[in-house]
Image: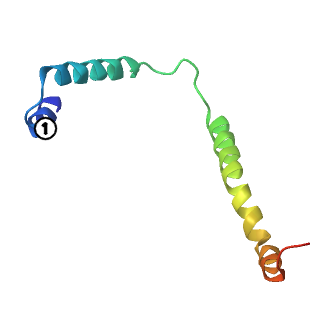
C-alpha cells in the first residue's frame, strides 16, 4: 500500500521517504494486537454510552426548550 502511495506521489526525495518510514514505524508501535487487560461488560458500556449521550444532548435540549424565551428577549430589545 505504501509503495502505491509513493508511486502516485511521483518525484519524491530520499529524505521525504525516510521521514515517511519513520512515521509509519511510529504508527505501528502504537497499534496493539493483544486482547484487553480488563474486560468491560455490557452494563458498563451501556452506562458510559448513556452518560456520554446525556452530556452531549443536554445543552441542545436546554436551548431548544428555552427557544421561545430567547425569541421574546430578542424582540424586546436590550435592557437598560
Q: Position of residue 65 (x, y in %)?
A: 78, 70
Residue positioned 66% across, 45% down in the render: 52
Residue positioned 13% across, 20% down in the render: 14
Residue picked out by circle 1: 9
Rendered image coloring scheme: rainbow
Q: Position of residue 47 (x, y in %)?
A: 69, 41
Work out which quarter of the rendered image holds the C terminus and state it. bottom right
Using the image as rendered, state which of residue 69 and residue 58 is in the foreground. Answer: 69
Q: Is residue 71 left or right of residue 36?
A: right
Q: Is residue 2 left or right of residue 55?
A: left
Crowd rating for badge 1 (residues with CA inside 10 Å; few <14, some 14–19, many 20+): few
Residue positioned 70% across, 44% down in the render: 51
For residue 77, which quarter of the picture? bottom right
Residue 9 vertical placement versus 56 (above, below): above
As drawn, the residue found furthest toward the right would be 80
Disc 1 is placed on an element classified as helix
Q: Position of residue 33 (x, y in %)?
A: 38, 21
Residue 34 vertical placement versus 67 (above, below): above
For residue 62, which quarter of the picture? bottom right
For residue 6, which quarter of the picture? top left
Work out which quarter of the rendered image holds the N terminus and state it. top left
Q: Is residue 3 left or right of residue 55?
A: left
Residue 52 vertical placement versus 24 (above, below): below
Amino acid at each position: 500500500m505504501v509503495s502505491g502511495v509513493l508511486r502516485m506521489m511521483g518525484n519524491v526525495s530520499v529524505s521525504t521517504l525516510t521521514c515517511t518510514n519513520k512515521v509509519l514505524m511510529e504508527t505501528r508501535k502504537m497499534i496493539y494486537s493483544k486482547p484487553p487487560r480488563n474486560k468491560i461488560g455490557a452494563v458498563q458500556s451501556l452506562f458510559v454510552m448513556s452518560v456520554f449521550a446525556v452530556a452531549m444532548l443536554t445543552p441542545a435540549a436546554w436551548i431548544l426548550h428555552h427557544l421561545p424565551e430567547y425569541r421574546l428577549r430578542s424582540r424586546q430589545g436590550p435592557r437598560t
